Amino acid sequence: MLRLIGWILILAGLAAAALGVLAWTAPQERTVTETPVATAPEREIALVLPDPTPAPRDMAPGFETNDFSTASMPNTATGLIPVAHEAPREARFGEPFEVTLSIDATGAERATSPLRGSGEIVEAQVELSGDIQARLIGGTAFEIDPQSPADQTLSRSVANVWRWNVMPLASGEHTLIIDVFMKTPTGTLQPVSSYSDRVTVQVSTLRQAITFAQTANPLFMVLGGIGSVLGGAVAALRFFSKASGRG
């Protein structure tokens, strides 16, 4: 029995020492504190009456001009435009995933073509024109790395796509929000739509052990591991000593 206890203590000491060394060598998890983005105050938008002349023949079919003047933007689409976004419902702690927003003003019926199909896709139609800004917000639970410009001008020739790489920093259920703004003729940002996705972040047993090693006091863990090894060695020596004495 004492021999078994000694071996258990030795193994426990080795595991604790390994975690302590891992805590010294492994990079520390980063804590991201999101800085709130101040939204420009809303102002009255001077509306321009639609031009009574017929729309150009090269305008995308099925789209009607809205009240915003597009005379200075001949390549800009305008009207009720298909929008789609994609985000996963589940993710793993420390493993990045992608969130995508697509706005297709080319005249296609759907905006899902640029999406990769790796998450849940949600479609909508929004009144848009001109310059668009899209932001992804995840609080301190995610680290967000934009892969495309936040400000884009709607195009009639190709779909506009926004992509973000997202790194989960905390386990549990968290919310990702895509906010879409339209720039008015006065240069201000007008909110036009917002999409919310709930993502459940799971943590594996190995990742939990690594996280514990990174957050625990490394010196304490190394000393504890050495102590456990010495304690197991002493117990084993006593056992062999007694066995040889009886012999």
Image: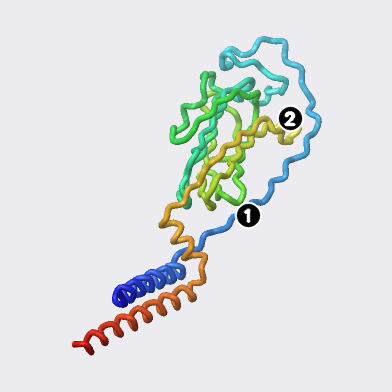
Whole-angstrom CA distance, mark 2 to mark 1, is: 33 Å
Indicate whether 228 appears above or below 48: below
Q: Position of residue 210 (x, y in %)?
A: 44, 61
Classify the position of the C terminus by image quarter: bottom left
Q: Position of residue 144 (x, y in %)?
A: 55, 47
Front one among 173 and 87:
173
Front one among 14 and 198:
14
Indicate whether 29 appears above or below 42: below
Q: Position of residue 218 (x, y in %)?
A: 48, 72
Kindly identify the residue that appears in the image at 47 percent across and 32 percent down: 115
Front one among 243 and 73:
243
Label 2 is placed on what type of residue? Answer: Pro
* Label number found at residue 33: 1
Kindly identify the residue that appears in the image at 41 percent across and 70 percent down: 16
Rendered image quadrant of residue 104: top right
Judge from the rendering whether residue 138 lies leftward or rightward of residue 220; answer left or right.
right
Rendered image quadrant of residue 226: bottom left
Which residue has dot 2 on it?
185
Mark 2 Cα within 10 Å, few/some/many (few <14, many 20+)?
Answer: some
Mark 1 Cα within 10 Å, few/some/many (few <14, many 20+)?
Answer: few
Element carrying mark 1: loop
* Label number found at residue 163: none
Indicate whether 192 appears above or below 147: above
